[in-house]
Amino acid sequence: MIKIETYRTNGFNGFSMDYFSFGNGKKTLVVIPGLSIKSVMDNAEAIADAYKLMQDDFTIYVFDRRRELPRSYSISEMAKDTYRVMKELRLNDIYLFGVSQGGMIAMSIAIEHPGFVKKLVLGSTSSHITNNQLTALNKWIDLAKKRDAEALCLCFGELIYPPEVFEQYRDYLLDMSKTVTDEDIDRFIILASGTKGFHLTEILKVIRCPVLAIGVYEDPVLDSDATMEMAEQMDWNGNFKLYMYTGFGHAAYDTAPDYCKRVYDFFMND
């Protein structure tokens, strides 16, 4: 059963954050999704179905970004807010899985709060946003600023999926574009812009928990070099593992049929 909630933080400078949870396992898994045009809450059922393998062993929480966004909102601030909500929900010893921008948030949390994360999986992400990696991001931001929801949704899908998957999703993306609101566009611009300037490569070595980095050789969004750069920094850790996909696109976490099993096996292999 999926439980969809909005949490309001306590005390001064409070904010609201949407999340949903499912599963009934004793272990706690937190999933931080990547940048999206529509809220991840719209896909709660599909996500829960994708993680059905894990539901007997984990209680799974999937967090959106905060509702009330400031005019600028960095990855560091996203991580701080997500951690605050998790702590107020009394989540501890978590298994943390972040993809794309969510992976940047996840590694930020693991660095700032080392005792909080039991194991970490980073999918299709980067510890250092380079000028080359800004190409896709800037293209999306430009389309969003033009308020061209249809072009934005198609461009987004074309860059995160391999060609054959993009064609399968084309009609879905076109239909989705008709539901994109001005608020969705404004949020997207702020969240996408928050990725710029992100750079944690030099301090990745402070992450002590076991880490699995999963990349894709053909990734037109963040490229495979991003995963290799992370691997170079964390390979000294005897608990670090690397896996690279071929042919599944940036969103391999959605398209590779064995992705969930790979994450599950890493988390369960104590």
Image: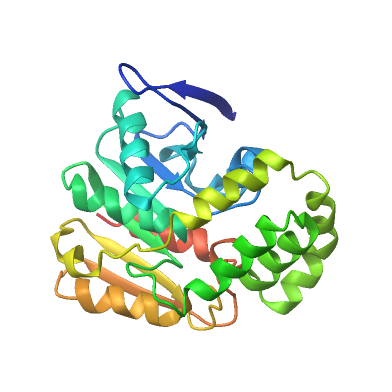
Relative depth, front residue between 181 and 259: 181
Image quadrant holding the C terminus, namely bottom left
Residue at point 53%, 78% (across, down): 219
Relative depth, front residue between 61 and 257: 61
Residue at point 41%, 70% (across, down): 214
**Is 179 on the left or on the right of 103, as rendered?**
right
**Is 176 on the left or on the right of 250, as rendered?**
right
Relative depth, front residue between 72 and 118: 72
**Is 172 on the left or on the right of 261, as rendered?**
right
Q: Is residue 268 visible?
A: no
Residue 254 position, x and y percent, is 60, 61
Residue at point 71%, 61% (across, down): 152
| Coloring basis for residues | rainbow
Residue 9 position, x and y percent, is 38, 22
**Is 18 on the left or on the right of 244, as rendered?**
right
- Above or below residue 21? Residue 100 is below
Relative depth, front residue between 253 and 102: 102
Image quarter for residue 225? Answer: bottom left
Residue at point 41%, 39% (across, down): 58
> Which residue of the protein is positioned furthest toward the top in this rendering?
11
Residue 24 position, x and y percent, is 46, 31
Image quarter for residue 187? Answer: top right
Number of numbered discs visible in the structure rendering:
0
Residue 83 position, x and y percent, is 31, 37
Q: Is residue 123 visible?
A: yes
Image quadrant holding the N terminus, namely top right
